[in-house]
């Protein structure tokens, strides 16, 4: 294994990163179509994507459909979930005229990049990846598949094909991004080719939004409030959130994680600080806190949900967005694969 000697760039970009600058010209992110997007996605990455796009960055968004079978035996309702993801993207403000929104499975060159990339990381490195370990612990499969084990490399191909330099993600993705950075550096070094920029993560002010049980809000852990949920469902989910019996509401993330998570959520929706909100609720207890959170979330999401409903009525348009995105992504991925093959001296390369 070649060990890299060049000094790496910082792995996480400054929050106020300016996409006009050299660090942010091309942005790639994505999500697994395992269910509806939730507030963790929205505050964790979606708002950053929209902000970067509005500032002029070129955006690539991958619907990571092959990644669903990393930890599921059956890719359940894949097409429906994929289309719903696109509806969520457009409803929150992504513009498909300029953003390239595509499904992984529609871009075959991504899987061809996987082989040379796999040769650049060791089994021990993959085994140490904390996010893979965590996802294995929450997996519904009895045995860990080879795909589950190698999926950070799979994801490296999803990122590097676009030569993105900025990747807006939640905190759980940092170990995966480190793999992509390692692959980029090692490929460039091993083949003496400066093909891949070293991508940096962009974290939001909510890099790990807790769900209603206090753990990371996740599609697959039954603790999420979906963007697509209606107002009554939102109220029911917030009512069921784990808190404590203390009447006075205070912001104490270490000592009172359930209360702190709810305060954080309402504060994000109202663009205030959790401490201010806690003061205001005072001795109102968990019931008053939950009422505040429900109102804040429903109010913030009202226009997004209305837009969602309009978009959901025209599935033909959503499928067209994915077709156009796949065309653009294939052109970029084929060009990158041709460079990779040429750098490796592959037979048949130009
Ligand atoms: P699954 O349970 O199927 O893994 P998920 O809810 O974890 O779904 P992903 O599709 O794995 O969602 O993640 C997509 C993106 O959203 C990633 O960048 C991830 O870091 C970010 N993200 C997911 N959940 C949160 C959260 N609770 N807070 C902040 N960011 C999040
Ligand atoms: Mg996940």
Image (cartoon, helix red, strand yellow):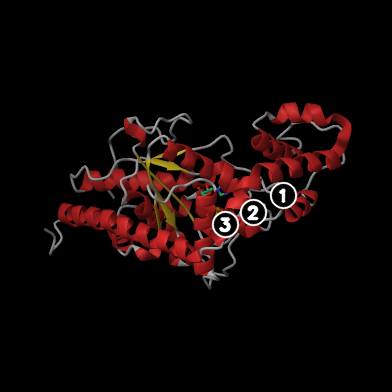
Q: Examine the image and state in which quarter residue 259 appears.
A: top right
Assess disc 1: are there few (<14), some (14-19) or many (≥20) residues with their C-alpha within 10 Å of its C-alpha. many
- Which image quarter has ligand 2? bottom right
Which of discs 3 and 2 lies nearer the camera? The answer is 3
Q: Which residue in the protein does label 2 denote?
A: 226
Say which residue label 1 marks: 212
- Find the distance from the CA under tag 3 to the CA under tag 2: 17 Å
* Residue 101 can be seen, yes or no: yes
Secondary structure under tag 1 reads loop
Where in the figure is residue 139, as x and y percent of width and height? 58, 63
Note whether residue 65 is visible. Answer: no
Q: Position of residue 239 (x, y in %)?
A: 80, 50
Question: Which mark sits nearer the N-terminus, 3 or 2?
Answer: 2
Q: Quadrant of residue 267?
A: top right
Give the position of the C terminus as an image quadrant: bottom left
Residue 163, image x, y percentages = 30, 46
Find the distance from the CA under tag 3 to the CA under tag 1.
28 Å
Mark 2 Cα shell of 10 Å, populated few (<14), some (14-19), many (≥20):
many
Tell me how many marks there are: 3
Q: If you read the primary sequence from the N terminus, does the residue marked by circle 3 or circle 1 appear first?
A: 1
Which is more toward the observer, 65 or 193?
Answer: 65
Q: Which residue is disc 3 drawn over?
A: 310
């Amino acid at each position: 294994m070649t060990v890299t000697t060049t000094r790496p760039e910082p792995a996480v970009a400054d929050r106020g990163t300016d996409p006009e600058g050299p660090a942010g010209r091309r942005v790639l992110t994505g999500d697994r179509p395992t269910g509806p997007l939730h507030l963790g996605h929205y505050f964790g990455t979606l708002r950053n994507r929209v902000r970067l796009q509005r500032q002029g960055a070129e955006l690539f968004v991958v619907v990571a459909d092959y990644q669903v079978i990393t930890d599921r035996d059956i890719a359940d309702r894949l097409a429906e979930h994929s289309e719903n993801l696109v509806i969520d993207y457009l409803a929150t403000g992504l513009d498909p005229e300029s953003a390239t929104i595509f499904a992984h499975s529609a871009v075959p060159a991504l899987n061809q990049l996987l082989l040379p990339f796999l040769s650049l990381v060791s089994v021990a490195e993959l085994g140490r990846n904390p996010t893979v370990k965590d996802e294995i612990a929450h997996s519904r499969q009895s045995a860990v598949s080879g795909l589950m084990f190698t999926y950070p490399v799979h994801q490296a191909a999803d990122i590097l094909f676009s030569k993105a330099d900025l990747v807006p993600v939640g905190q759980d993705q940092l170990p995966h991004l480190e793999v992509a950075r390692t692959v980029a550096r090692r490929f460039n070094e091993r083949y003496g080719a400066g093909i891949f920029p070293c991508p940096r993560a962009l974290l939001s002010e909510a890099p790990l939004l807790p769900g209603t049980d206090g753990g990371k809000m996740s599609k697959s852990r039954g603790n999420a409030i979906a963007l697509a949920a209606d107002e009554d469902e939102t109220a029911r989910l917030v009512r069921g959130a784990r808190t404590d019996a203390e009447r006075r509401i205070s912001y104490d993330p270490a000592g009172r994680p359930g209360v702190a998570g709810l305060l954080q959520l309402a504060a994000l929706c109202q663009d205030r600080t959790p401490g201010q909100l806690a003061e205001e609720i005072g001795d109102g207890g968990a019931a008053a806190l939950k009422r505040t959170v429900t109102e804040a979330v429903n109010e913030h999401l009202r226009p997004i949900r209305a837009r969602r409903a309009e978009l959901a009525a025209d599935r033909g348009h959503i499928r067209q967005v994915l077709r156009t995105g796949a065309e653009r992504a294939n052109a970029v991925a084929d060009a990158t694969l041709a460079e990779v093959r040429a750098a490796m001296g592959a037979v048949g390369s130009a």
